[in-house]
Image (spheres, grey):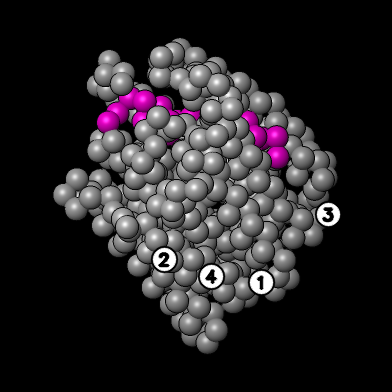
C-alpha cells in the first residue's frame, strides 16, 4: 500500500472530480432535454436515449478499464480515457442530429468511464479497507456539491448561450482534470501487485460473479442506482411537461435530491466506523424499499401532487450514495487483489442496470408520474432482495 500518498488531501479532491465525470455528464444537461429535442427536431424518446446510451458506454468502458488497470496500472489508462472523453465532447457540441448526438455520447461515455472506475481503484491502492469506506463517502460529498451545481449551471448556460455551451463547459472540466492527473497523480499500483496476465485479469470477473455475497453487493447498489436513473431519465418530462415547472425550477428540485445524498453521506461517514458497512447497507436498502412503495402509492392514486413525489424521490435518491460507498467497500474487502476488476464490475453493473431501467421508462409515451414510479418500485424491491442475500452464510 502506498502510504506516502495518504496525507495528501489534494488527491482526494482530484479523485472526487474524476468520479464526478459520470454525474456531471448527465446532470448538467437534464434541464435542457426538452429544448434539445425541439432544436434537433427529435422525439422525446430519442433524446432520452442519449442518457441510456451514455450508461451503456459507461458500463462497457468500466468492464475494460477495471481489469486492464489491474494488469497494466492506473495512470496511463486514466489519461487515455480522459483524452477520448475530450474528443467526444467536442463532437457532442457540434452534433446536428439526434443520431450524431447519440454516437458522440457513446464515445464520451467510453472515455469518461476510465475516470470513474480508476478513481475508486486508486482509493483501494492508497487506503486500507476501513478507511477506504470513509474516503469514498467523503468523495461522494465533494462530488455531490458539484452535482448540485450542475443542473443549475446547465439551465443557466441554456438560458444564456444555448444547450451546446454545456458541452463546452464539460470540455474545460475534463481538460483541467487531465492536467491535474498528469502532474499530480502518480502510478499507485506497484508492478509487483499487478496481475500477471490478461487471462487472469478477466478471470477475476468470473470469480467475483460466482461469489454469492459479492454478486449480491453489486446487485444491491446496482438496483438503487437503476431506480435513481429512472428518476433522472423521466423527471425532466414529468416535472416540466406534466407539473409545469420551469427548467430553472427543475434544477432546484433536482438539487434537493443531491442535498439528500450529501446528508446521508455525512451520516454514513460519521457512523460507519461504529456500526460497520453491513448495517448501513441494511438500513439503506430498507429505506429504498419503503420510499419506492410510497411513490407507487402516490403514482397509482394521484394523491400528493408534485410535492408528494418530490419527498418520496428525495428519500430514495438519498440512499444511493450510502449503498454505493458501503457495497463497494465490502466488495473490495472480499477481493483485495482484484480491486480494479471488482470496482469496474460493480460500477459497470450500476450503469448497465441504469441503462436497462432508463430504456424501459423511456418506452412509455406518457409523461405522468405513474410509469416513472412504477419502474422505481421494481428497482427498490430488487435492491432490498439483493441486500438480503449479502448476509454472511
For the residues marked 3 and 2, what is the alpha-carbon distance in whole angstroms? 41 Å
Q: Quadrant of the N terminus?
A: top left
Could you tell whether 211 is left or right of 348 in the image?
left
| Residue 133 in picture, x, y percent from top left | 30, 41
Distance Cα–Cα, label 4 vs label 1: 19 Å
In the picture of the structure, the residue carrying the numbered disc 4 is: 378
Q: Nearer the viewer, residue 125 or 71?
A: 71
Dots 3, 1 in contact, CB < 8 A: no
Disc 3 element = loop
Question: Which residue lies under the disc numbered 3?
Answer: 41
Question: Which element type, helix, strand or loop, lies under badge 1?
Answer: loop
77 or 234, which lies in front? 77
For the C terminus, the quadrant is bottom left
Instruction: Locate residue 246: give its quadrant.
Output: bottom right
Q: Is residue 137 visible?
A: yes
Q: CA distance from mark 2 to mark 1?
A: 27 Å
Q: Nearer the viewer, mark 2 or mark 1?
A: 2
| CA neighbours of label 1 inside 10 A, class few (<14), some (14 to 19), many (20+) | some
Of labels 3 and 4, earlier in sequence is: 3
Q: Which residue is mark 1?
A: 367
Residue 201 located within the stretch drawn in magenta: no
Residue 175: percent from left, percent from top: 57, 23
Work out whether mark 2 precedes mark 1 in sequence or the reverse, and give the earlier one. 1
Disc 2/disc 4 C-alpha distance (Å) = 10 Å
The span shown in magenta is: 106-128
Residue 125 drawn in magenta: yes
Look at discs 3 and 1 and give the one toward the viewer.
Answer: 1
Identify the residue shown where x is 30% and y is 62%: 283
Amino acid at each position: 500500500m502506498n502510504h506516502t500518498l495518504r496525507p495528501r488531501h489534494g488527491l482526494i479532491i482530484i479523485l472526487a472530480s474524476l468520479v464526478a465525470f459520470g454525474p456531471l455528464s448527465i446532470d448538467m444537461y437534464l434541464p435542457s432535454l426538452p429544448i434539445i429535442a425541439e432544436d434537433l427536431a427529435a422525439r422525446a424518446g430519442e433524446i432520452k436515449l442519449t442518457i441510456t446510451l451514455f450508461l451503456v458506454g459507461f458500463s462497457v468502458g468500466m468492464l475494460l478499464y477495471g481489469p486492464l488497470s489491474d494488469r497494466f496500472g492506473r495512470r496511463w489508462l486514466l489519461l487515455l480515457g480522459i483524452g477520448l472523453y475530450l474528443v467526444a465532447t467536442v463532437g457532442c457540441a457540434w452534433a446536428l442530429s439526434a443520431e450524431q448526438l447519440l454516437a458522440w455520447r457513446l464515445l464520451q461515455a467510453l472515455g469518461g468511464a476510465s475516470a470513474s472506475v480508476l478513481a475508486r481503484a486508486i482509493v483501494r491502492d492508497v487506503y486500507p479497507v476501513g478507511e477506504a469506506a470513509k474516503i469514498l463517502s467523503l468523495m461522494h460529498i465533494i462530488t455531490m456539491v458539484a452535482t448540485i451545481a450542475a443542473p443549475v449551471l446547465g439551465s443557466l448556460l441554456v438560458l444564456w448561450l444555448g444547450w451546446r455551451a454545456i458541452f463546452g463547459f464539460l470540455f474545460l472540466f475534463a481538460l483541467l482534470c487531465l492536467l491535474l492527473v498528469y502532474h499530480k497523480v502518480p502510478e499507485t499500483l506497484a508492478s509487483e501487485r499487478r496481475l500477471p496476465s490478461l487471462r487472469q485479469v478477466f478471470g477475476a470477473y468470473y470469480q467475483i460473479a460466482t461469489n454469492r455475497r459479492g454478486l449480491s453487493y453489486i446487485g444491491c447498489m446496482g438496483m438503487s442506482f437503476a431506480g435513481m436513473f429512472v428518476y433522472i431519465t423521466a423527471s425532466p418530462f414529468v416535472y416540466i411537461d406534466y407539473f409545469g415547472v420551469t427548467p430553472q425550477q427543475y434544477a432546484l428540485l433536482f438539487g434537493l435530491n443531491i442535498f439528500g445524498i450529501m446528508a446521508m453521506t455525512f451520516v454514513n461517514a460519521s457512523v460507519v466506523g461504529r456500526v460497520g458497512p453491513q448495517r448501513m447497507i441494511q438500513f439503506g436498502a430498507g429505506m429504498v424499499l419503503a420510499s419506492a412503495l410510497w411513490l407507487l402509492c402516490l403514482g397509482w392514486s394521484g394523491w400528493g401532487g408534485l410535492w408528494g413525489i418530490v419527498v418520496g424521490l428525495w428519500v430514495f435518491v438519498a440512499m444511493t450514495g450510502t449503498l454505493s460507498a458501503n457495497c463497494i467497500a465490502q466488495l473490495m474487502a472480499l477481493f483485495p487483489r482484484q480491486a480494479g476488476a471488482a470496482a469496474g464490475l460493480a460500477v459497470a453493473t450500476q450503469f448497465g442496470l441504469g441503462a436497462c431501467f432508463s430504456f424501459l421508462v423511456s418506452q412509455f409515451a406518457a409523461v405522468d408520474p405513474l410509469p416513472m414510479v412504477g419502474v422505481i418500485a421494481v428497482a427498490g424491491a430488487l435492491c432490498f432482495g439483493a441486500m438480503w442475500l449479502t448476509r454472511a452464510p
